[in-house]
Every structure is written in structure tokens, then in C-alpha cells.
Image: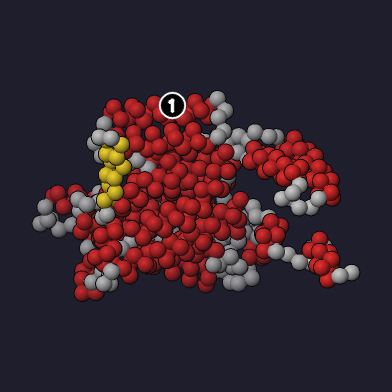
């Protein structure tokens, strides 16, 4: 046999694998794929934030500030919509982020960790504790502003109460994945469920408490668009284009209504159909028929460029795969990559450029707003999550994730103090350009709290979860008092 034919034989015998073949053969569950993307996205998010900090504190600071405030406009005839580049990202691109958050929320509620009440109870209780206690910590500190300060300054500081509620799922999962050989997978699942409930809480807080003066005409228009979206779902429209076009209209209506426009992403996501078109048995039968035709056609001519029948079979198979998935799952899969690798890093880059002067850093960290954010995220999240879980387990509500110990759940409470993306977003809503000094304090607090929580949570779990203990933990589920 010639070397040429031997090479072919090796390829057919799977001795040789091209990179795309190895990727094709590797099967990842949706959860594994989700965690992998969150971890990679977290690293890119960190790099974007560091780059912004370097630029804002170097000779590139004027260029960075010019870029952030660069005006961009969309105009059609006499109509014109103009915002800074930062605002286009925060109000426009972040709507895609909230769209993916909405898809994740809907999937978790219908078929994920939040679908089974017994299984969902502990992360829900933990998330509630992790939202309420940080708010109380922040209010307790900022209410202690000097009595000599004017009332308007005190009221302005209180607008940041929602900042320490938020958990950055990408960063938190990224840290936990570094400990994958020490903690059970169920602990990562617990963190994902907790963070998704936390996201839902943040969305509700933004909608209810960080809303400007309402314009009822625009709000009624938004309600009308939402009604059309629901009708599209009910009559069985599965193509994403109508939903995206209506979502853009909903975004514009909310933008004019005073409600934050990014909430259009969540509302549109909840209208996306979650029902597959094919039933599993019919799909399996159809795939077998197609693969029989594929093998027969492949035996006649292996080149897909010249074999029209082979190409037609592959295209039919692709269309069938698209239809067997629900539109919700497919959109979540397709959009997770651009959102995690483009939208969120851009948001981090345009919002993390905090000018820091060593001489005034200590003074900034001692300000009530900064202390409220730092202690709210670090102490409030830990006490709220660990305390709520302890109470729930003590009184028989919920159960620990399989193979975990309470001390590991408490470690997740530390990791949840990584606020970053959503915390910065709420800080922009709370303070914005009206209180730039408070916005600077809040962002400084978010950065320091996220760094401390990430390191503390990592060390806590690393020390209290010995390497190689995962296998042993999966056979038992200790109680609250186990160490």
C-alpha cells in the first residue's frame, strides 16, 4: 500500500485526528459549556478592567476619557438620537447582556436548578439573604454620614443601596472552577442558581427603584409591543427575527418611558418560545434515515464539493438539528459567546477606568459610600448567604447540594461578594453624572471588594476542601454542623 493510501487508511481508522474532528467528537453538556464560557469570559472581563485602569492612570488618560465620552448619533431625517459611546454601550449593548440573562432565567425556571422546588429552595433563600443583608450594611453605613453634611448629599449617597446586592456570575464561577479538583460539581451548580436568582433580584430592583420620571405614553407603547411579543409566542412563531425587531421597538419605548431601556432585553427573552418543534422519537428516526442516505452517498463520492446529494443530506440534517432545539436554547447558545466575549468586556473597559491617586486612595476608601459598598459586598454577602443557608437547613427548608458541606456553601458566600459587572451597572444608574464623586467611590469600592472576595473565597475553599476529597464527598452529605 502506498503512503498516500496508508494516510487515507489512518484517517478512516481514526488514527489521525484533525483539531476540528476532535472538537466534533467531544460532547459537552449545556451546563459544562455554560461554565466553560463563563470562566473564559471572566478572564477576558478581568483583562478589560485592568486595561481600563492602566489607561485611566497613565499618559493615556486623556485619550481614554475622550473615547468614553465620544458622542455618537443615529439620525433619520429630523429625528436624532445622540449619546456618548459609554452610554450606547451601557444602554444599548447591555440590553443584549440582559437578554441572555433573561434566557438563562427562563431556562432555569422551566427546566433547570430552579424548576424543582425542593432543589431550588436553598439557592433562592441564599440569594435573598445575599441581597437583603448587603443592603442593610450599606444603609447602616451611609446613614451615618456626618450630620453637618447637607441633606441632599446624604440622600444622594443612599441611592447606591442596590450596588452591593449584585454578584458577578462570570468572575465567581471562574474562581470556583480553579478549584474543580477540590469541590464537587454540585457546588458550582449551587453558585450558578444563586447568581441567577441574584440577577433576577437586580433586574427587579432596577425596574422598580432606579427608574426616572415615567412617561406614560411611552410606557403604554412598551406594553403594546410586549403584548405583540406574547402573541408571537402563542401563535407559534419560532424565527428569532420578529422577536429581535419587536425587542428593538420595546427598547426604544422603554428608553423614552423613563424605565431603564436594558430591561427590554429581559422582557423580550421571556417571550422567546421554549418548546421544541420535533419530538425526540421522530427526530431520532429522521436522523437514522438521513445517516443511511449519507453513508450510501458517501460510498459513491466522498467529496462534499462535488456530491450534491451528500451536501443536501448534510443541510437537511443541519436544519433538523436547528428545529429539535427550542428557540430559547438556540439563542442562548448563539448569543452567549458574543455577549461574554464582546459586550461584557466592552462594558468593563468603558466603566472600570477609575483614576486613582495614591495620596487620596486612603481617604476614598474611608468614605461612607466606599465603605458601604466594600463591607456590603464582602461582609454582607458572606453573612447573608451563609446565615440564610444555616437558618434554612436548621429549620428543614431545603437541602445541601449533593456531596457538599456547609463550610463550602459559606465559601460560596465569600465568592458572591465579587460584584463587578452588575454592581458597576447599578452604580452608574444610582449616581451617573449627577454625583461623579460618589460614582468614583462606588466603583473603587466594587473593585477592592471584588478583589478581596475573590482571593478570600478561593483561599477559604482551597484550605477547607483538600485535594482529592471530591470523590469521598460525593458519597455523603454532611449536615450543617460538619466541618
- Disc 1, SS: helix
Q: Residue at x 40, y 37 (%)?
A: 248
Q: Quadrant of residue 59?
A: bottom left
Q: Residue at x 78, y 38 (%)?
A: 285
Q: Residue 131, position in %: x, y?
A: 39, 50
Q: How many marks?
A: 1
Q: Quadrant of residue 134?
A: bottom left
- Above/below status of 192 relative to 260: below
Camera-side residue of 186 and 247: 247
Q: Residue furthest bottom?
A: 359
Q: Residues within 10 Å of mark 1 (few under 14, many from 20)?
A: few
Camera-side residue of 103 and 452: 103
- Above/below status of 401 relative to 269: below
Q: Quadrant of residue 5?
A: bottom right
Q: Does residue 326 appear to the left or right of 12 in the view shown?
A: left
Q: Does residue 370 appear to the left or right of 393 in the view shown?
A: left
Q: Residue at x 34, y 33 (%)?
A: 253
Camera-side residue of 273 and 145: 273
Q: Residue 426, position in %: x, y?
A: 32, 50
Instruction: Mark yes or no: residue 452 visible.
Output: yes
Instruction: Mark yes or no: residue 384 visible.
Output: no
Q: Residue at x 53, y 29 (%)?
A: 233
Residue beneath label 1, please? 227
Q: Residue 306, position in %: x, y?
A: 74, 49
Amino acid at each position: 500500500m502506498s503512503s498516500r493510501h496508508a494516510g487515507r487508511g489512518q484517517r478512516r481508522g481514526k488514527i489521525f485526528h484533525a483539531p476540528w474532528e476532535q472538537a466534533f467528537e467531544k460532547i459537552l453538556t449545556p451546563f459544562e459549556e455554560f461554565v466553560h464560557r463563563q470562566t473564559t469570559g471572566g478572564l477576558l472581563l478581568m483583562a478589560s478592567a485592568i486595561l481600563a485602569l492602566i489607561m485611566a492612570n497613565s499618559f493615556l488618560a486623556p485619550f481614554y476619557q475622550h473615547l468614553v465620552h465620544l458622542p455618537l448619533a443615529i439620525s433619520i431625517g429630523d429625528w436624532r438620537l445622540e449619546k456618548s459611546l459609554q452610554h450606547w454601550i451601557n444602554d444599548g449593548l447591555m440590553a443584549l447582556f440582559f437578554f441572555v440573562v433573561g434566557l438563562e432565567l427562563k431556562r432555569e425556571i422551566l427546566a433547570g436548578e430552579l424548576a424543582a422546588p425542593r432543589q431550588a429552595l436553598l439557592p433562592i433563600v441564599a440569594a435573598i439573604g445575599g441581597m437583603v443583608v448587603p443592603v442593610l450594611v450599606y444603609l447602616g453605613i451611609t446613614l451615618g454620614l456626618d450630620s453637618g453634611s447637607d441633606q441632599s448629599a446624604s440622600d444622594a449617597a443612599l441611592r447606591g443601596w442596590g450596588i452591593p446586592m449584585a454578584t458577578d456570575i462570570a468572575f465567581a464561577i471562574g474562581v470556583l472552577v480553579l478549584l474543580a479538583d477540590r469541590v464537587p460539581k454540585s457546588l458550582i451548580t449551587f453558585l450558578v442558581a444563586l447568581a441567577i436568582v441574584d440577577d433576577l433580584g437586580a433586574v427587579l430592583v432596577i425596574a422598580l427603584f432606579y427608574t426616572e420620571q415615567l412617561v406614560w405614553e411611552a410606557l403604554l407603547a412598551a406594553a403594546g409591543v410586549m403584548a405583540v411579543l406574547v402573541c408571537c409566542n402563542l401563535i407559534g412563531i419560532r424565527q428569532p427575527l420578529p422577536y429581535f425587531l419587536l425587542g428593538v421597538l420595546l427598547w426604544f419605548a422603554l428608553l423614552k418611558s423613563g424605565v431603564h431601556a436594558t430591561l427590554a432585553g429581559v422582557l423580550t427573552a421571556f417571550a422567546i418560545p421554549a418548546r421544541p418543534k420535533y419530538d425526540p422519537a421522530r427526530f431520532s428516526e429522521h436522523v437514522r434515515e438521513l445517516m443511511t442516505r449519507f453513508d450510501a452517498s458517501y460510498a459513491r463520492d466522498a467529496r462534499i464539493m462535488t456530491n450534491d446529494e451528500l451536501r443536501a443530506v448534510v443541510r437537511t440534517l443541519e436544519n433538523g438539528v436547528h428545529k429539535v432545539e427550542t428557540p430559547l436554547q438556540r439563542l442562548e447558545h448563539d448569543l452567549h459567546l458574543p455577549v461574554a466575549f464582546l459586550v461584557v468586556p466592552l462594558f468593563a473597559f468603558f466603566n472600570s477606568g477609575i483614576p486613582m491617586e495614591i495620596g487620596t486612595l486612603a481617604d476614598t476608601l474611608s468614605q461612607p459610600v466606599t465603605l458601604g459598598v466594600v463591607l456590603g459586598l464582602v461582609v454582607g454577602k458572606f453573612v447573608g448567604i451563609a446565615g440564610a443557608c444555616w437558618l434554612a437547613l436548621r429549620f428543614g427548608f431545603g437541602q445541601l447540594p449533593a456531596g457538599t458541606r456547609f463550610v463550602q456553601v459559606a465559601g460560596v458566600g465569600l465568592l458572591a461578594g465579587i460584584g463587578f459587572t452588575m454592581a458597576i451597572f447599578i452604580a452608574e444608574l444610582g449616581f451617573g453624572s449627577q454625583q461623579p464623586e460618589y460614582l468614583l467611590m462606588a466603583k473603587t469600592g466594587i473593585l477592592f471588594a471584588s478583589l478581596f472576595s475573590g482571593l478570600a473565597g478561593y483561599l477559604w475553599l482551597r484550605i477547607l476542601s483538600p485535594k482529592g476529597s471530591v470523590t469521598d464527598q460525593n458519597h455523603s452529605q454532611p449536615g450543617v454542623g460538619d466541618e
